[in-house]
Structures are given as structure tokens and as C-alpha cells.
Image (spheres, rainbow, N blue to C red):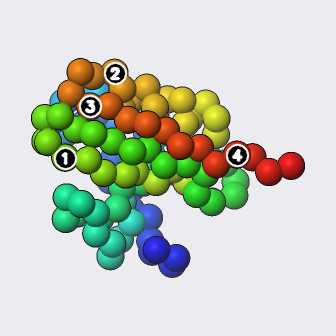
Amino acid sequence: MSGAEIVIDRPKNSAHPRFPQLIYPVDYGYLENTRSMDGAGIDVWLGTEKQKQINGIMCIVDLMKRDSEIKILIACTEEEREQIYQFHNNSPYMKGLLISKRSEG
């Protein structure tokens, strides 16, 4: 994944294409030229920290699609990670587990 370009196709505060009541709290997209369980690119949340390093992952179970996948969190602040966690857990049809990298120092 090193060197893969991040493509943001759902910017912060935009609505989900199929569920317009869901608003993305942080930039959301995928890593170009990668493949996830659903056959599309690996999903990423891109936060606002200066250092563009992976600092968490969301492990998702989608009961409507009957699948699971991970979403990589890059440069997400603690507040952004909480917003992403809430985004994935505010529905009875999707649940997620956040795994955060501990801050060093």
C-alpha cells in the first residue's frame, strides 16, 4: 500500500449516495490500485493531522450487505476517530470496532 494514492470520493460533510441522512464526518475514500473484500479499493478515512500516518482501523460488519471489511484511518485526530466510530455504529445494520494506534511519546 506504500505509495498508493488516496482518492477522496466522499468529502467531509457530504451525504452518503444511497442514504442521504448519513453525513461523512471526515474525508472518506479509497487507496487507488488496491482491492478490498468487496472488490473495490481499500477504504480510508483521511483526517487532519499533519503527519499522514496510519493511526487506526475500523473493523466493520455490515448486516445489510452481509459482509465485513476494514477501513484504514490515516492522520485522524482523537476527535475524528470518535466521529468515525459513531458513524459506523449509529445504525442497527452496521457495527464497527475501532482499533487505534497509541500515541508515542
- Dots 1 and 3: beta carbons under 8 Å? no
Residue at the spot x=43%, y=26% of the render? 86
Q: Which residue is mark 2?
A: 90
- Dots 1 and 4: beta carbons under 8 Å? no
**Image quarter for residue 42?**
bottom left
Who is closer to the viewer here, 18 or 99? 99
Who is closer to the viewer here, 48 or 34? 34
Q: Which residue is mark 3?
A: 94
| Image side of residue 98 versus residue 53, left or right | left
Label 1: state its secondary structure: strand
Residue at the spot x=80%, y=51% of the render? 104
Amino acid type, mark 2: Asn
Structural crowding at the residue carrying mark 3, measured as other residues with C-alpha within 10 Å and reported as few (<14), some (14–19) or many (≥20): some
Structural crowding at the residue carrying mark 1, measured as other residues with C-alpha within 10 Å and reported as few (<14), some (14–19) or many (≥20): few
**Image quarter for residue 33?**
bottom left
Amino acid type, mark 1: Asp
Residue at the spot x=64%, y=40% of the render? 77
Who is closer to the viewer here, 24 or 89? 89
Structural crowding at the residue carrying mark 2, measured as other residues with C-alpha within 10 Å and reported as few (<14), some (14–19) or many (≥20): few
Mark 3 and mark 4: Cα distance apart in space: 25 Å
Q: Which residue is mark 1?
A: 67
Amino acid type, mark 3: Met
- Dots 2 and 3: beta carbons under 8 Å? no
Mark 1 and mark 4: Cα distance apart in space: 28 Å
Mark 2 and mark 1: Cα distance apart in space: 17 Å
Q: Which residue is mark 4?
A: 102
